[in-house]
Amino acid sequence: MQPLFEGTPDLARMRRERHAKLVAAMETQDVDVLVLLGESNVRYATGAHAPAAEIGRATLQRPIAVVTVDGWVPHVFSAFPEGLPPELPPESCHGPLPVELGGGGLVDAIYDVLGGRPVGVVAFDEYTMPLYAEVSVSGLELGDASAVMGAAKLCKTFDELACIREAQRINDTAMDAVRPLARPGVRQTELTAAFLRRIRELCISSNCVDPVWQVMPARVSSGPYSTTGDVVFPTATTDRILREGDVIWTDTGCNWNGYASDHGRTWLVSRDARPDAHQVAQYQRWRAVVDRVLEATRPGATGGDLVRAACVGEARRPWLPHFYLVHGIGTDPAEAPLIGTDLGSEFDESIVLVPGMVMVLEPVIWEHGHAGYRSEDVVAVTETGWIALSHDTYHPFPDD
């Protein structure tokens, strides 16, 4: 099945198809204008991107997108014209709006874009405080862009799937280079440095998930502590020195052409790095849960079907209560669908699998007194079942 995603994605076609999905979602939800400030949303709607920067500078220089339900192209307000896609006509490309320092004239810009046409419902994905002060007295009928963006992003096109697969390949390749370095005496920060260096060598300029190399405690009482009383994951990288026998859960991500990847595995910090019988049993339990979920994965299945499949033969849900069985991935490393969360069975039943939906399978197996096992497998729903978008091994655990 792998030839489905071979070859270079057509990025211009991908942007056209994304715009069509956005307009369709706007029509369905009676939204006339979409105003986007979130970086991944702007890139999804327009293809525009800005260079990676420290968060304060990135916020001040953020691109903004305005999408109209009757427009054939979106409008972009950006300080980085070099980051705009070539097919955008000059009349759709505008200078930056300082919405972090003041309203920035965004309301006037919306009226200019519409050219005298009726405004209708204007849906925002987020506000700055000065912008909210401006729009709250503008007389605009305000809406929430999250429902529109969620509907458009849920099912990926051929080109989007190809981008996710390539991002995942680069992420997996980089982690293959880091894995041999996870030895006693090494600091977590050294692993982060090695990962960032390798993705840069593979032509990735930034990461979208701060690398996690968390040493998992065998007992909740070992900390850190949470308000739920559950074991905590994930925690940020520190300069902690890895010790013989540590069980670490990894989590990394990088973007390719605006699409995220997500690599998670369980590593053993040891000079021989061989799991004991109990650790192998934890891995096999995780593998069995994932295999049952994959067997149930097909168009028309619900999130509830996947949860029930995962729980066959289990006394209770085999993943942490505050975690999930499945999350989606796309322009963000975690997005819809979210399955097996604490939102309950009714929410899970409302999610129906369709071709093009991408899922990250991430059940967390953790046992008091024995730490646990966790990995992430990325798959896409097809017309007949599913296809893998990640292919890294589970080393040092059995691959059969």
Image (cartoon, helix red, strand yellow):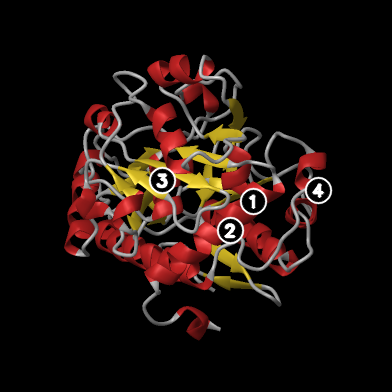
Which label belongs to residue 21?
2
Residue carrying label 4 = 349
Mark nearer the N terminus (2 vs 3): 2
Q: Quadrant of residue 128?
A: top left
Q: Which amino acid does label 4 sit on?
A: Glu
**Between 27 and 316, the one nearer to me in the picture:** 27
| CA separation in Å, label 2 and label 3 | 14 Å
| CA separation in Å, label 4 and label 2 | 24 Å
Which label sits in the foreground, 1 or 4?
1
Q: Do the residues labelled 2 and 1 touch (CB within 8 Å)?
A: yes
Residue carrying label 1 = 25
Q: Are marks 4 and 2 in contact (CB under 8 Å)?
A: no
Q: Which amino acid does label 3 sit on?
A: Val
Quick check: 207 above or below 53? below
| Mark 4, secondary structure of its residue | helix
Mark nearer the N terminus (4 vs 2): 2
Q: Quadrant of the C terminus?
A: bottom right
| CA separation in Å, label 1 and label 4 | 22 Å
| Mark 3, secondary structure of its residue | helix
Q: Can residue 234 be seen in this view?
A: no
Q: How many residues crowd mark 1 within 10 Å: few (<14), some (14–19), many (20+)?
A: many
Residue carrying label 3 = 42
**Between 79 and 265, the one nearer to me in the picture:** 79
Q: Are marks 3 and 4 in contact (CB under 8 Å)?
A: no
| CA separation in Å, label 3 and label 1 | 16 Å
